[in-house]
Amino acid sequence: MKACFVGLGYIGLPTAIIAATEGDVDVTGVDLDSRVVEMTNSGKLHIVEPGMGEKLRRAVDSGRLEARQVPVEADAFFIVVPTPFKGDHQPDVSYVEAATRSVIPFLREGNLFVIESTSPVGTTEAMADIIFAERPELKGKIHIAYCPERVLPGNVAYELVHNDRVIGGIDEASSEAAAGFYSRFVRGTLHRTNARTAEMCKLTENSSRDVQIAFANELSMICRKAGIDVWELISLANRHPRVNILRPGCGVGGHCIAVDPYFISSCYPHESRLIATAREVNNYKAQWSAERVAMAILKFQIDHDRWPVVALMGLAFKPDIDDLRESPAMEIARDITDVYGKKMEILVSEPNIEQHPHFRLTPWQEAFDRADIVVYLTGHTPFRSLPRSAEGKEIIDFCGITSKFV
């Protein structure tokens, strides 16, 4: 079995590695970024994902995985590229279309073509139309399916193997062909359905999470105004056997939960009012958080007749990863540095990356020690070893680092 994965990002590369190491598949990974190709071929992981570095080295050393900048002939093709926004949160499937067109010359009778990229409902059928428009002789002779990833960053090595998968073919034969491939390395159950249901399933999963997080974030703002410890409140409420309130934060980030709900609300605006409102709440939480930091800075300046040293702790969108996509912590850090960066010293700490084009990074212990105001934006594990309180420091905690509850 030979497979070609187009896109070697946070999902494409790990899936290619697992297919090579666990699925007995000869894999060609394709990425336009020459640095990604070079690093992959040298066995170096260009992302942070626990447990995946050793698997990459094993895949490359065994000859099971090779990276290139252009596709090659294979038995199965996988599209794992971004689906960003255009205009007013309208889904942009141009990357999916470009990746699809790049493999059309290599398709042969009996091949499997799978889209894993998060996509609006109907995308798989639209790509099938493009393929058959250019290669009409392949209609009814190749298998086309949609199979979304459903993994948690930081635990991808385990979840790619053990999580259930939803397999949505454009016909029953396509679903079976895709299931046949994933059964090589997936130990979870493979749930067969049609392409449209599989596409909506992915969007539904992340929209559901977004709505639940919006409730927690809204609750945290209410509790702030009411003078209540939201962490204690959630801990107590969750003692109810049928209540499971999630943890609030400074917003919602990542290329899934912060993005996928728009794929529903943009296509079905009148029917998705709850989903759209949840997006508004979670987006506003970042603005609310930045305003709270700004008020603390101004109060310090008035009380002490000098500007404070502020430590902004964490840039990633969730704990213990290096992924900054759609990160509310990044948005807050930019807002604070843009307004106050020339007036005062702002220390930015992100332990999971070595450098950043916009911020000069400071080691987390140094940032904490030097700061007058410590702002926890992301709940990275190293931060939990720092004191919960310190004389002369104000600590603003948006992610529960200092709480004894939850």
Image (cartoon, rainbow, N blue to C red):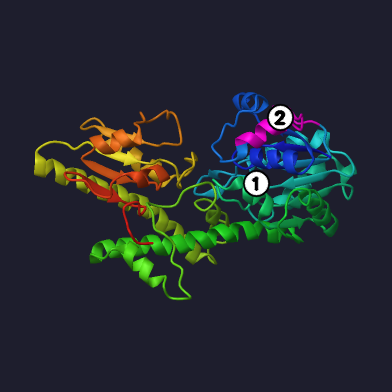
- Placement of the C terminus among the 4 image quadrants: bottom left
Residue 131, how many percent across, how many down? 79, 43
Residue 242, how many percent across, how many down? 48, 75
**Label 1 vs 2, first from the N-terminus:** 2
In percent of the image, x 38 and y 72: which residue is there? 237
The crowd level at tag 2 (other Cα within 10 Å; few <14, some 14-19, many 20+) is many
In percent of the image, x 31 and y 52: which residue is there? 402
| Front in this rendered view, residue 238 or 305 | 238
Residue placed under numbered mark 2 in the picture: 60
Q: Which residues are magenta?
A: 53-72
Residue 371, how many percent across, how many down? 23, 38
Q: Is residue 279 left or right of residue 404?
A: right
Q: Of discs 1 and 2, which sits in the foreground?
A: 2
| Front in this rendered view, residue 321 or 58 | 58
| Front in this rendered view, residue 284 or 371 | 371
Report the disc number at residue 284.
none
Q: Secondary structure at mark 2?
A: helix
Residue placed under numbered mark 1 in the picture: 117
| Residue type indicated by callout 2 | Val
Verify whether residue 144 appears in magenta.
no
Q: Quadrant of residue 361?
A: top left
Verify whether residue 56 appears in magenta.
yes
Q: Secondary structure at mark 1?
A: loop
